[in-house]
């Protein structure tokens, strides 16, 4: 699947879905981010479905109404990798490390790597 650059609203909706641990309805997305309009969210969800960035995880009751519950179909890490134009997560990480001059940030990165190795 070839990834495409997301618009601001598409990115907002995707960010909410990526942060959620369960599929969400359009109304749940609006409740999470009050600055979004339900009509806008529904239009964005349709575009994201066509782009295959999201999928309908289930159709179930939300209160007393049947609703579609949406879930991401791509990983946030894959989209970030696409944005950076990198071929691998290693390229992204190495570029970020090279650009970092703050000792504390580098120390935190080292701790994350060590934690990942140990798990």
Image (spheres, rainbow, N blue to C red):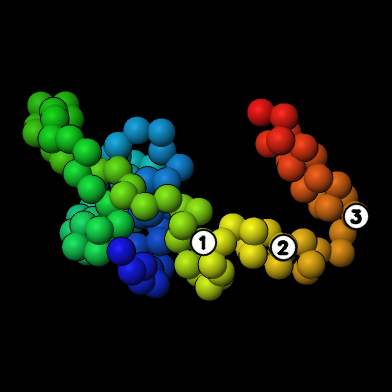
Q: Which residue is mark 3?
A: 103
Cα distance between the residues tagged 1 and 2: 14 Å
Q: Which mark is residue 80?
A: 1
Q: Secondary structure at mark 3?
A: helix
Q: Quadrant of the N terminus?
A: bottom left
Q: Which structural element holds mark 2?
A: helix
What is the quadrant of the C terminus in the image? top right
User: Which image quadrant is residue 97 in?
Assistant: bottom right
Marked residue nearer the N-terminal end (1 or 2)? 1
Tell me where residue 76 appears, x and y as whole percent. 46, 53
Mark 1–mark 3 CB contact (< 8 Å): no
Which residue corresponds to mark 2?
Answer: 94
Q: Residue at x 23, y 48 (%)?
A: 55
Q: Residue at x 30, y 43 (%)?
A: 71
- Asked whether, in this view, residue 37 is left or right of residue 107, the answer is left
- Per the model, the C-alpha gap separating discs 1 and 3 is 24 Å
Q: Nearer the viewer, residue 81 or 88?
A: 88
Q: CA distance from mark 3 to mark 2?
A: 16 Å
- Callout 3 crowding tier (Cα within 10 Å): few <14, some 14–19, many ≥20: few
Residue found at x 74% / y 42%: 113
Compared to 31, does 99 lie above or below?
below
């Amino acid at each position: 699947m070839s990834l495409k650059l997301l618009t601001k609203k598409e990115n907002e909706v995707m960010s909410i879905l990526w942060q959620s641990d369960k599929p969400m309805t359009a109304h749940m997305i609006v409740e999470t981010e009050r600055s979004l309009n339900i009509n806008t969210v529904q239009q964005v969800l349709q575009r994201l479905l066509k782009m295959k960035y999201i999928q309908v995880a289930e159709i179930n009751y939300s209160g007393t109404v049947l609703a579609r519950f949406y879930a991401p179909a791509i990983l946030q890490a894959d989209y970030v990798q696409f944005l950076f134009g990198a071929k691998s997560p290693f390229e992204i990480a190495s570029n970020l490390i090279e650009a970092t001059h703050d000792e504390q940030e580098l120390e935190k990165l080292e701790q994350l790597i060590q934690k990942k190795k140990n798990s």
